[in-house]
Amino acid sequence: MKKEDVQQLIDKYMDGATTVAEEQLLRDFFSQRSLILPKEWQPLQALFAWEQHQRGEKTKQRQDKMGKSARKVPLWVTRALSTAAIVAILVVLGQHFFFANKNYAMVNGVRTTNKEVVQYEAEAALEMVSTDGSEDFSALLMMGDNENEK
C-alpha cells in the first residue's frame, strides 16, 4: 500500500468511518514485521497489535469455555447411560433367542413348530375355502353381501 492510501485509511479510522474490510487492511498493514513506520504511526501499530492480542485472548477463552462445557457431564452419568444401553441390547438379544423357537401352530390339536407342515396346512385350508385354485381369498369375499368388499 502507498503511504497516501494508508494515511487516508488512518484518517477515516480515526473518524470512525471505516468499514470492516478497511479496518482489516489496516490490521494487515500494521502487523507486518519488517515494516519501518513514521513516528506518528507507531502508536497505531501498538494499538493494532494490542487489538490482535485481545482477539486472540477472546478466541482462546471461547475455546476453553467450550471445552469445559463439554466436560460438565459427570462421569457417573456417562457410565449409567452406557450400562443402560448394554442392558437394553442384552434384553433385546435375550428375547430374540428365547422366543426364536417359541413360534408354533396347532394342527389337528397337535402343537407343531415345523414350518413346512404349517405352510402345507395353511395352503390346504385356503384351497378348501377358495372357489378355484387361482383365487384363494375369493370365498372370503363372497361371505358378505357388501358390494364394497368385492
Image (cartoon, rainbow, N blue to C red):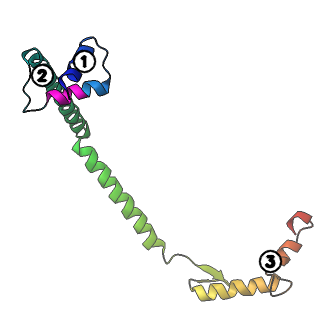
- Type of the residue with mark 2: Gln
Q: How far apart are marks 2 and 3 (CA)?
A: 90 Å
Q: Distance between the residues labelled 1 and 2?
A: 16 Å
Is the C-beta separation of discs 1 and 2 under 8 Å? Answer: no
Return the x and y of residue 48 as percentages of the image width and height: 16, 23
Nearer the camera: disc 2 or disc 3: 2
Q: Can residue 57 be seen in this view?
A: no
Return the x and y of residue 28 as percentages of the image width and height: 19, 31
Residue located 7% across and 33% down the image: 34
Nearer the camera: disc 1 or disc 2: 1
Magenta segment includes 26: yes
| Secondary element at tag 1 | helix
| Secondary element at tag 2 | helix
Q: Name the residue under label 3.
A: 137
Q: Mark 2 points at which residue?
A: 45
- Type of the residue with mark 3: Phe
